[in-house]
Amino acid sequence: MATYKINQNKLLQELVAAVAEDKMYWVRNDAKIRAATTSKSYDEFRDIVAAAHLQPIKNKDKERRQRSWNTLTDGN
């Protein structure tokens, strides 16, 4: 009987990737269901599904960033 050595780091990386992929699948699926009843065109449907993973910026994220988001406007 052959014995195999399991690379636990690789196994953990594969598990994390699979969980993230599954989460993304369900986020997009929920967006598809919502968009199917609310969108007026295919382009709007596609945009809703494509942006399903985006989340609004929180106030604490804004406060962490000291400099301007647009570097062309702050003189740099």
Image (tube, helix red, strand yellow):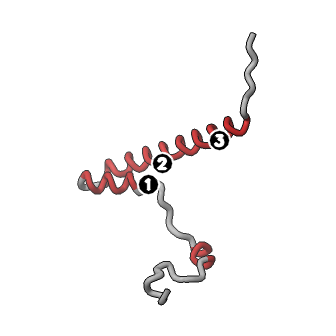
Question: What type is the residue that disc 2 sits on?
Answer: Val
Q: Quadrant of the N terminus?
A: top right
Q: Which mark's residue is nearer the viewer, 2 or 3?
A: 3
Q: Which residue is mark 1?
A: 52
* The disc label shown at residue 37, or none: none
Q: Which residue is mark 2?
A: 27
Please count the marks in the image: 3
Q: Earlier in the sequence, mark 2 or mark 3?
A: 3
Q: Label 1 to label 3, Cα distance in Å?
A: 24 Å
Residue 54 % position (x, y): 47, 59
The residue shown at (59%, 42%) is 17
The residue shown at (38%, 46%) is 33
Residue at the left extreme of this rendering: 41
Q: Is residue 61 above or below residue 38?
A: below
Secondary element at image label 2: helix
**Circle 3 residues within 10 Å: few <14, some 14–19, many ≥20:** few
